[in-house]
Structure formats: structure tokens, C-alpha cells
Image (tube, rainbow, N blue to C red):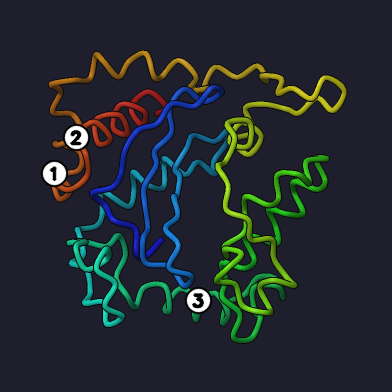
Amino acid sequence: IKNVDPKSFKLVQNKYLGVIIQCLVTETKTSVSRHIYFFSARGRIDPLVYLDEFLRNSEPVLKRVNRTGNSSSNKQEYQLLKDNLVRSYNKALKKNAPYSIFAIKNGPKSHIGRHLMTSFLSMKGLTELTNVVGNWSDKRASAVARTTYTHQITAIPDHYFALVSRYYAYDPISKEMIALKDETNPIEEWQHIEQLKGSAEGSIRYPAWNGIISQEVLDYLSSYINRRI
């Protein structure tokens, strides 16, 4: 997420959640570009709420010089996080680890997310979806990655987001997502996008990101937060 290009943020439709935010990272360990998503989730762990807090309390970071000579990433003007922020976070998490799994020696904490997501999907009877949470391609994976993680590059289906959002439950018999009764389900949010055109709502809430992150994205996020609160 550190290397995400803020200018790549855009809105994409989702069958179950109405709209989600998609962004692109081109500088990865495998040199394979990947998308990162921010979407509404039921309860206090809502990625859009945390994205809102981040954008309100941070400023754009100029992209560091890429010494690998990758022309695609050299065209990138900004990155989402400071270089030392991830390292500091990992050190702090390891030092104050509430559970032993967070104190893995020399282990990137992003691996934990893949372990947890794979276990979660397996418990839900959706092991076929675990291939989309891998981080490596077939051609550029290390020996450890090949034997430890799934690494097929594939599109993430809409019902994957539905399940993780907790606005829906999976019915193993019909193999369909069943909407849970919750008035905060953002499925209708997409209908308000047209009404936001020409609005300065996002510019006012996130002044530091004007002209960098799409106005449509800023307006949508601001509107979502106001509706949720």
C-alpha cells in the first residue's frame, strides 16, 4: 500500500456494495501491477472510514526515486505512504504484539493478512477464492512463495467483497449471498454519484489531495462518511 499511486484512485461498481474505490500499485516485489481496494464494511472496521481519516490528516508524499529503472513507476509523482512508515509500524507491532503471531521474527506483517484471509475463506467453505489473495505471479515467485502461498493472478469477484463486508452471509446450499438486514448497507450509494457532480464537498474535506486524487472519489468518500455518521 506504500507504493500506491494516489492519482490512480477511481470508483468501480460492485453488484453487492454499489461502489468501491480501486487504486493501483505498479512497484511490487514481483514487478506485477496489482489493485488495492477500499470498500464499505459493516461494524467499526470499515476501510472507508480509515481512508477518510488518513486523507484528512495527511499530505501527499513525493515518490522516491526508483533505482531499479522501472520506467512505469518513474512516471509516478506521488506515493501514498512515507518510506519509513511501514518499517516503523512493523517494529512497533512486533515490540507491542498483543498475540504471538504478530511477533514473527523478520516476517513481513502483510503475510499475516493472507494467512488470516485464507483461513477465513476456508471456514466459510469458499476455498476456491483463496487464490485471489496471493501476492506472487507464477513466473516471478520465489521457491518459498510457491510452496507457502497461492499466487494466481485473477480478478476478484464481486461476492468476495460482499462476504468480507459482512453485509451478506453465504448460503452453502444455494451458493448465493444473502443480504443481512442492515440499513447501513451502501448498495444504494451509487445512485448518489450523479448528484455529486460539481460538488466541492470532497475538496473542502480533503484539501491536501485536490488535483491528485480524482474529484469524483473525494466527493464520494466525503458523501459516504456524512451518510454513515
Q: Are marks 1 and 3 in contact (CB under 8 Å)?
A: no
Which quadrant would the N terminus be assigned to in this image? bottom left
Q: Is residue 168 above or below residue 109?
A: above
- The residue at 24%/57% (across/down) is 58
- Amino acid type of the residue tagged 2 in the rendering: Gln
Name which quarter of the figure residue 175 lies in.
top right
- The residue at 78%/41% (across/down) is 126
Q: Which of pointers 3 and 2 lies earlier in the amino acid sequence? A: 3
Q: Is residue 229 left or right of residue 100?
A: left
Which element type, helix, strand or loop, lies under badge 2? helix
The residues tagged by marks 2 and 1 sit, at their Cα atoms, a distance apart of 7 Å
User: Tag 1: Cα neighbours inside 10 Å, few (<14), some, or many (≥20)?
Assistant: some
- Amino acid type of the residue tagged 1 in the rendering: Asn
Q: Which mark is residue 63?
A: none
Q: Is residue 26 above or below residue 141?
A: above
Q: Which residue is mark 3?
A: 90
Q: Which residue is mark 2?
A: 215
Q: Which mark is residue 210?
A: 1
- The residue at 62%/54% (across/down) is 133
Which element type, helix, strand or loop, lies under badge 1? loop
